[in-house]
Image (cartoon, coloured by chain):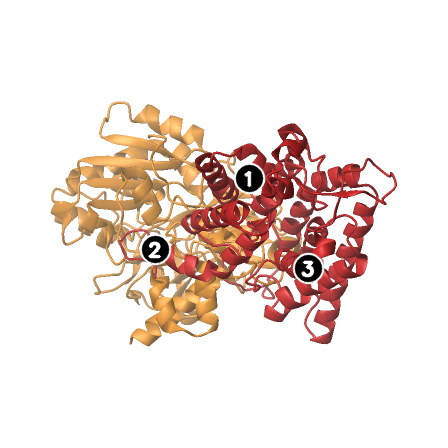
Amino acid sequence: MSILKKHLQGIHVDHRKNTMNHAIETMPTPDIVYISMSQHIGAPCEPLVSVGDHVKIGQPIGNSEAFISAPVHSSVSGKVTNIEEVMSSLGTMDKTIIIKTDKKQELWEDIKIPTAETKEEFIKAIRDSGLVGLGGAAFPTHVKYNPRNLDEVDTLIVNGAECEPYITSDYRTMLEHTQDIVNGILLIMKHLELKQCYIGIEENKPEAIERLNSFLSTFPNIKVITLDSRYPQGAERVLIYETTGKVLPPGKLPADIGVIVSNITSIAFLAKYFRTGVPLISKVVTVDGDAVSTPKNVRVPIGTKIYEVINFCGGYKKPPKKIIFGGPMMGRAIYDDGKPIIKNNNAILAFDEDQALIPNETACINCGRCVQACPLNLMPTAIDKAYKRNDIDALKNLNVAICMECGCCSYVCPAKKQLSLVNKLSKALVKEAGK
Amino acid sequence: MKNYKYDNLIVASSPHLVDSITTSKIMAMVIIALMPAFAVSIWVFGARAIFLTGICIIACVVFEYLFNKITKKPSTIGDFSAVVTGILVAFNVPVNFPYWMAIIGCFVAIIIAKQLFGGIGQNFVNPAITARVVLFLAFSTEMTSWPTPQRIFLATDAVTGATPLALFAKQNFDQLPSNTEMFLGTIGGCIGETSALALLIGGLFLLFKKIISPTIPVSFLGTMVVISLIAGIDPIFQICAGGAMIGAFFMATDYSTSPLTTNGKIIFGIGCGLITMVIRLFGNYPEGVSFSILFMNLIVPHIDNLSRRKLYGGGVKND
């Protein structure tokens, strides 16, 4: 890449990748799993099983007729003890299937290695696998890989940036499942007839870059792009720009500018699915934070409660004060460690009191750090002032709607103002006014 | 298996990680950056520089504290911005300036320019600059009686003389100090503004610590150099003389009263440099830095409106 190339703004955050050298450990199957019917963006699934049914690993237990949805599979073998409405970490009431494991861990008999000759069969197989965007968005992958204008798409961009602090689950996948990543890319490129692929990885993961490059020497159309270690390189718009130089205008989808972006762990899973036929039933989760005894990367059966995962990591070292699903920049603070792991969880961070408390807000000193940090050139301080005046016209003019909530503005603010939160509230305000 | 459950957790919006920088740290860094100039001022002007600076700091902090107290607002003296203002007010007056007049300057800076408009971040003119201009207009004699440079802790009953810029304005070119003296600061002038070298060290420290961006100082001083060259006068003399250095690095870069975007900062810096040189070359006053910054402060909202950046992805102008 040329030094003269213009980069988008961003921020330098402490990487805190403490678990980089912790190989993925598989945790024992818990006694009970709680599998939500709503683990993706789109329509929730309806249970396919009833209380008292016996289910096996990989058996579909929830599905939906809706286009934007993805089936849910059992991560254990055992008996369905209850199906109830449980409040999710988002605060919504979701149907949840509770399965008591029989400890036999038998694989479902109907699991077979998918064969896909045509694009349609390939997309159907992806839907059957239950795959959703594992980077965090949880958008059903079969929808993403099947845009209306697929003939205009020629590039696959693989997101291996993993720009959030702490999280190393993608990094471990890159090191431990390199061949799956390459196979997955080849599968996608073949079936979607794509010409080239860029894998974007931040420069703070030299081993992963080197390892992928060593697997890719015979594929000249698949290139690893080393990205600066600057948050948020893994944000879709930023990644597309930094790998291809293309700008994704607001309101457009990546396919409109000829690219499909996919998370690297999603791609590794895809290859594994086409190798074994086992659907998405487990997830590698980075467990870290000052309140955790032994930070680790853990392969967790979907539906395992958080505290069981933490117990596998030696339990809490100190009482946790904040538990985060995902990374510290964009992750969601949850109110109860009894919530189950869902498909798109890539990290659990348990912060102690010192880490959890963010200093109080003071007055804005107009330093402009937020303006210099925003990757999309928004003006968070002006948005903050417009929001306080409830000035919806000004908020519209400030284009708050395109904010991707990356949190750069809040991170850099010396007055500790919650600018990112104000952006979210402003977006809601503008949306509400537009109705 | 241990089965602790925690449901007394903090739930907050992301991000859950913030930078360690705070307003207090920024102000502390500015104070550190002003120390080289302070040291030179003591060396050049003697002990009274210490007393005057100390009194201005105390006055500013006390005024801020009292204002917060009277208006029942949380105390903001902990952010050290009043200390910075105090130092800058002191740095902008001659060393034999009466203490009570300096305290009036602090009152103007903290109460009138800053707190009456909402406190830190809300003021639209730089408090120290405002104080300097008010003092200059109110106490012209005292503000323009310049003791000739002393050496440390010598008698402060100094002989007064003209500053280099005053000599320049009267076209007494043969009495001008050398550029080396100008750069080191062994010349007459306000307490903190004489040593270009010390101010440059402080300014570079702020740049290195990323407290300020180079945009304003470079465009400010750059414009002065260009105009000097066009006018056929010595550009080094112009940027070392008077308040140019302290203005460019410490006062024009004040966050609240300078534009947010890089383009805006360039316009602001050029404006400051231009007005300074126009006053120096054509005006009645020998020095124009404070007037130029004050004037540019006033039009910052318009510069901000004109210099909004193009939004990522779209030609949609951010207005």
Q: What is the crowding at mark 2: few (fewer than 14 residues within 10 Å), some, or many (at least 20)?
A: many
Are the residues at dot 2 and dot 3 in contact (C-beta closer than 8 Å)? no
- Is residue A46 found left or right of B110 in the rendered image? left
Residue A89 seen in this snapshot: no
Amino acid type at image mark 1: Asn
Amino acid type at image mark 2: Ala
Are the residues under badges 1 and 3 in a single subunit? no
Q: What is the crowding at mark 1: few (fewer than 14 residues within 10 Å), some, or many (at least 20)?
A: some
Chain letter, colour red in render: B
- Is residue B295 found left or right of B66 in the rendered image? left
Please name the residue that numbered disc 2 is placed on.
A138
Q: How many marks?
A: 3
Quadrant into which the C terminus of chain A falls: bottom left
Residue in front for this viewpoint, A203 or A124: A203
Residue at point 56%, 40% (across, down): B207
Q: Earlier in the sequence, mark 1 or mark 2?
A: 1
Expressed as whole percent of the image width and height from the top left, the position of residue A224 reads 32, 31
Please name the residue that numbered disc 3 is placed on.
B135
Residue A43 seen in this snapshot: yes
Please name the residue that numbered disc 1 is placed on.
A18
Q: CA distance from mark 1 to mark 3?
A: 57 Å
